Image: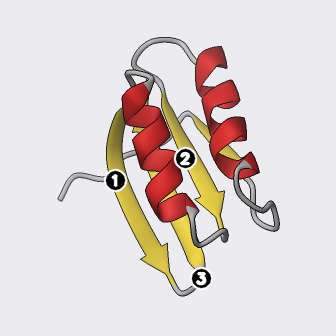
Amino acid sequence: MNEIIPNYTLDVKGESCPYPALKTLEALKQLQNGEILEVISDCPQSVNNIPLDAKNHGYEVLRVEQDGPILIFLIRK
């Protein structure tokens, strides 16, 4: 599997839903087309909310990983 190197990282650990998803969408708006945002969250609902919201706004979810309670999303604008 090819390694995906993000252009930016958004750490929203400690934030409760819906804030991780909202902050992700705000951050993605700031990116240039083709840039990749890494989002790190520990909100259990993020596993559904962040990918769904990103796709609904036209962004490409490249990867979703979980390491214990930590969720990592890679999303391309």
Labels 3 and 2: the sequence-earlier one:
2
Q: Is residue 42 above or below residue 53?
A: below
For image coordinates 41% across by 67% down, the residue present is 65
In space, the residues marked 2 and 1 are separated at their CA atoms by 9 Å
Foreground residue, 36 or 48? 48
Q: Image quadrant of residue 57? A: top left
For image coordinates 34% across by 53% down, the residue present is 63
- The local secondary structure at tag 2 comes to strand
Disc number placed over residue 25 in the picture, else none: none
Foreground residue, 44 or 27? 44
Residue pointed to by mark 3: 69
- The local secondary structure at tag 3 comes to loop
Labels 1 and 3: the sequence-earlier one:
1
Residue pointed to by mark 2: 38
Q: Is residue 31 above or below residue 75?
A: above
Number of labels in the image equals: 3
Labels 2 and 1: the sequence-earlier one:
2
Q: Image quadrant of residue 58? A: top left
In space, the residues marked 3 and 2 are separated at their CA atoms by 16 Å
| Identity, as a three-letter code, of the amino acid under mark 2 | Glu
Q: Image quadrant of residue 21? A: top right
Residue pointed to by mark 1: 63
User: Residue 53's x, y, as percent?
Assistant: 48, 37
Q: Left or right of 3: which side holds 19?
A: right
| Identity, as a three-letter code, of the amino acid under mark 3 | Pro
- The local secondary structure at tag 1 comes to strand
Q: Disc 1 vs disc 3: Cβ atoms closer than 8 Å?
A: no
User: Residue 31's x, y, as percent?
Assistant: 58, 18
| Identity, as a three-letter code, of the amino acid under mark 1 | Arg
For image coordinates 44% across by 12% down, the residue present is 33
Which image quarter is the N terminus in?
bottom left
For image coordinates 51% across by 48% down, the residue present is 50
